[in-house]
Image (cartoon, rainbow, N blue to C red):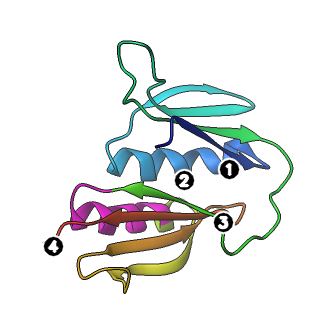
Amino acid sequence: MLDHVSITVSDIATAEPFYDAIMRVLGVVKVGRRDDWLGYGERARPAYPERVYISIRKGEKPDDAPGRHWCFKAKWRTQVDAFWDAGIAAGGCDDGPPGLRSYHASYYAAFLRDPDGNRIEAVCHHPV
């Protein structure tokens, strides 16, 4: 459904280790960096419409909005665990450790807050 997403952070240098770490464990490649931007994934093109891209952009610190979050798909539950571990080690805050959630019987997810407080999730929908 989504083609691309942008997340705003107040400090790219502080956000970069966090996003590098969580994207790496999810198998998402870093495609670029500037002082005001980080890019991950691949931009869609006519020959590759299924691609997805995320940019981290410098801006004002985002307002707290508990219902707003970004969720990334993980292929395995171990990736969800690694996402949470890597995010904590790289300056994120726990917002819900890895585990099953009530959304459906196989919904295995973890929640983090990035250094600016953005809520980030990884989920695996597979039963094992």
Disc 3 marks a residue whose amino acid type is: Arg
The secondary structure that most of the magenta stretch takes on is helix
The answer to whether the residues at label 1 and label 2 have Cβ atoms under 8 Å apart is yes
Give me the disc on residue 127.
4
Mark 4 or 1, closer to the camera: 4
The answer to whether the residues at label 4 and label 1 have Cβ atoms under 8 Å apart is no
Cα gap from disc 3 to disc 4, whole angstroms: 26 Å
Question: Residue, x 46% and y 43% (percent of image)?
Answer: 1
Cα gap from disc 2 to disc 4, whole angstroms: 28 Å
Q: Position of residue 28 (x, y in %)?
A: 38, 39
Cα gap from disc 3 to disc 1, whole angstroms: 21 Å
Q: SS at mark 4? A: loop
Q: Residues within 10 Å of mark 2 (few under 14, many from 20)?
A: many
Residue named by callout 2: 18
Give me the disc on residue 68.
3
**Along the viewing direction, whichever of 57 and 47 lies nearer the viewer:** 47
Cα gap from disc 3 to disc 2, whole angstroms: 19 Å
* Residue range (magenta): 74-87
Q: SS at mark 2? A: helix
Of labels 3 and 1, earlier in sequence is 1
Left or right? Give the position of 14 relative to 49: right
Left or right? Give the position of 8 relative to 6: right
Disc 4 marks a residue whose amino acid type is: Pro
Residue named by callout 1: 14
Q: Position of residue 124 (x, y in %)?
A: 28, 64
The answer to whether the residues at label 3 and label 4 have Cβ atoms under 8 Å apart is no
Relative height, residue 93 to residue 79 (above, below)? below
